[in-house]
Amino acid sequence: MSPVPEVATRQNDHAGQRDLTADSVTITVPVDGYEKVVRLVSAGLASRLGFGFETVDDLQLAIELVLRSVPARHGAATVRMTSDGRSLTIDIAPVDGLTLDQSLQPLDGAGVALGDSLSRLVDSVDLRPDPEATVVLVKLLPSSER
């Protein structure tokens, strides 16, 4: 049985109440088969932050490419999306065994490196090994773009 998707927002300082206006969303889903759930959640936050339709689509595709490329298909992944007022940062973990040099699955065309495709969709791509393997995607907010 697959784990049930979990959605959480940032806690505020007022007696541990949830701050539903915070520009931060975390969702944990099974890696296999829940890409569309994460696409919906990411579209909602990106739209709230003022991204246009094409940029929202790029962000959704970037997240989906990472999730579809995670070698361990039976585990869960946590997608954390946060805005600092200048950019949207998307952390996807764990992604053990994933490299940015690996070829993409047929979704985007075999033979194209994951990192190359991601760098066309977002402003910054990083793969951090510690404390757990994490892909970090950064997209500047519309008011921050030059």
Image (cartoon, rainbow, N blue to C red):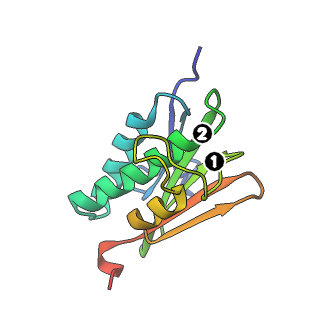
Which label number is shown at residue 93?
A: 1
Tell me the quarter of the image containing the N terminus: top right
Indicate the position of residue 3 as horizontal and vertical percent values.
58, 23
Q: Residue shown at 27%/56% (left/top)?
A: 47
Indicate the position of residue 79 as horizontal and vertical percent values.
53, 47
Which picture quadrant has residue 91?
bottom right
Indicate the position of residue 70 as horizontal and vertical percent values.
60, 41
User: For this rendering, which residue is in front, 18 or 38?
Assistant: 38
Which kind of residue does numbered mark 1 sit on? Ala
Q: Residue shown at 52%/48% (left/top)?
A: 66
Q: Give the farthest residue toward the left.
A: 53
**Is 90 situated left or right of 74 in this image?**
left
- Give the residue at mark 2: 77
- Secondary structure under tag 1 reads strand
How many neighbours does mark 2 have within 10 angstroms: few (below 14), some (14-19), or many (20 or more)? many
- Counting the numbered discs, the total is 2
Residues tagged 1 and 2 counted as in contact (Cβ below 8 A): yes
Q: Residue shown at 36%/72% (left/top)?
A: 141
Q: CA distance from mark 1 to mark 2?
A: 5 Å
Is residue 142 shown above or below 88? below
Which picture quadrant has residue 139?
bottom left
Q: Residue shown at 28%/64% (left/top)?
A: 51
